[in-house]
Amino acid sequence: MQKDAAFCFNCYLFGKETRTWVKFGWHNWNVGNAALDKHARSVVHKFAQDKYNLFVKKGTKIDSVIVKVSEQDRVEYKARLTYSLRCLRFILRQGMASHGHDESEESTNKENFLELMEWLAGNNEEVNKVVLKNALGNCILTSPCIQKQIIRCCSMETTKNIVEELGDDYFAILADESSDMSHREQLVVCLRYVDKLGRVCERFLGVIHVPGTTSLQLKTAIQSLLASHHLTLTQFGGQGYYGASNMKGEVKGLKTLIMKESPTAYYVHCFAHQL
């Protein structure tokens, strides 16, 4: 900044940078006020002045300015979320897809989730009051993104219950790897164990991306997935894969690497491939 020059403090803090009033300053400030009056009437200065006024005014903090949500809105939001969750739980238990390619108002088939929600609203007046067209415009809770988030929460809760049911008992793993449509290698891991009632259970644990299909890379991926659920290789009581060399190899195969850390993890060839 230049000496003996006047600057606009408000524009310097909140306005767009201008050559005269912010960067170089006004040198003829002691001659006349015409330029000063012109700047004071400008849109740029008024915009910066409004921001400065809000900045120095008390009670303009973000938590004071945001509109508070009423208790009625909270109740309706919770009810709307509950109905969306119930519809998605039904779809997940039946193993169906939740949404499709066309969920617009003009669509003759909006796929499972929206069709089920419309059916529920059409048969229950309490539901109809808070969902779909009767919901707030920006809080309908039916978009594909919301559906995925709710499904993700269901997945996390289901996996949590599986791990809690397993506890510290021994279990076996069933694993297989394959490439998806984008040619990325994916590893599927399932748990096989006996529950408290003596029933043999097979539960899906997760799908994880692996950078390659070497036995060491697969072992690292399995360890990482188990560790995220507080499970370890020492709990292994068995392992089942198909017959590829990287899986059942006697020297450097996945089953050999795991048995070095957990000798009780006996290998059984996958029954599906034995056929």
Image: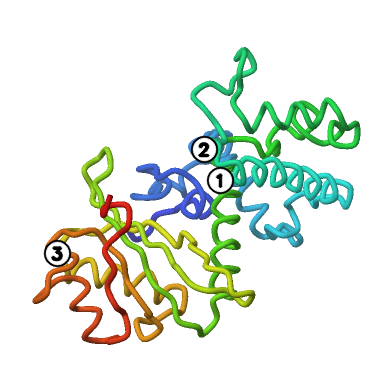
Left or right position of 158 against 16: right
Left or right position of 186 against 121: left
* Identity, as a three-letter code, of the amino acid under mark 3: Asn
The label on residue 246 is 3
The label on residue 243 is none
Image point (37%, 69%), residue name: 173
Farthest residue toward the front?
275
Query: Callout 3: helix, strand or loop?
Result: helix
Q: Nearer the viewer, mark 3 or mark 2?
A: 3
**CB of mark 3 within 8 Å of CB of mark 2?**
no
Quadrant of residue 105 within the rendered picture? top right
Residue 55, position in %: x, y? 64, 57
Q: Is residue 209 above or below residue 225?
A: above
Instruction: Indicate which disc, 3 or 1, sits on the residue closer to the N terminus.
Output: 1
Q: Is residue 26 above or below residue 56?
A: above
Image point (35%, 64%), residue name: 174
Image point (45%, 62%), residue name: 205
The label on residue 44 is 2
Residue 196, position in %: x, y? 62, 77
- Residue count near mark 2 (Cα–Cα under 10 Å), binned few <14, some 14–19, many ≥20: some
Left or right position of 242 against 94: left
Quadrant of residue 90 within the rendered picture? top right
Label 2 and label 1: CA atoms lie apart by 6 Å
Position of the N terminus by quadrant: bottom left
**CB of mark 2 within 8 Å of CB of mark 1?**
yes
Query: Callout 2: helix, strand or loop?
Result: helix
* Identity, as a three-letter code, of the amino acid under mark 1: Ala
Label 3 and label 2: CA atoms lie apart by 68 Å
Q: Can you identify the residue that label 1 sits on?
A: 48
